[in-house]
Image (cartoon, rainbow, N blue to C red):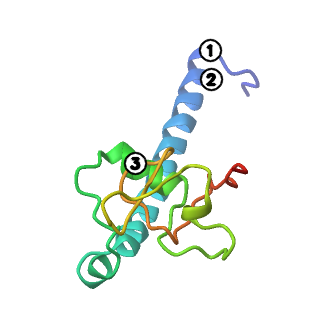
Amino acid sequence: MKDKMNRREFLEKVSLLGIGAIGAASLLNACGKKEESASQGSGQAAKADPCADLTGLTADEKQLRVTFQYVAESPYPDKLCDNCGFWVAPEGGAACGGCKVIKGPIHPKGHCTSWVAMPPS
């Protein structure tokens, strides 16, 4: 019986392990995308939130919003976008502001994981 593995066998097994890990990660990522697209919504959900229009954003910019777990309604009453150090106030009476970290329209009562307290003025 052969106890030692040669270099070729080792590389084959490591390659298969890597391919399997990439496949599993892709599958898990795809499962999460379905829920995200449902939560981003189209139709009534998009109409209800004036800041939900993400047209003009690249896929990377949209992914960054997901990475920072941006939501239009903050689960933390004291940590809102409009009292964050990265908040960019809306101009011209617009309902949505902006953010120095993530692109696109930002709801003033939203929240993401990059929230930081505003520096004292």
Q: Check contact, mark 2 vs mark 1: CB within 8 A.
A: yes
Where residue 80 appears, x then y in whole percent? Answer: 60, 67
Q: Residues within 10 Å of mark 1 (few under 14, many from 20)?
A: few
Q: Amino acid at mark 2?
A: Phe
Secondary structure found at label 3: loop
Work out how far the residue at label 1 is from the one at label 3, CA to CA, in angstroms: 48 Å
Q: Amino acid at mark 3?
A: Lys
Residue closest to the eye, 41 or 111:
111
Would you say 56 lies left or right of 67 here?
left
Q: Quadrant of residue 98?
A: bottom left
Tell me the mark number nearer the camera, choosing from 1 and 3: 3
Q: Residues within 10 Å of mark 2 (few under 14, many from 20)?
A: few
* Label located before the other in sequence (1 or 3): 1
* Label located before the other in sequence (2 or 3): 2
Position of residue 43 relative to residue 78, above or below, is below
Work out how far the residue at label 2 is from the one at label 1, CA to CA, in angstroms: 5 Å
Query: In the picture, which quadrant includes the N terminus?
Result: top right
Work out how far the residue at label 2 is from the one at label 3, CA to CA, in angstroms: 45 Å
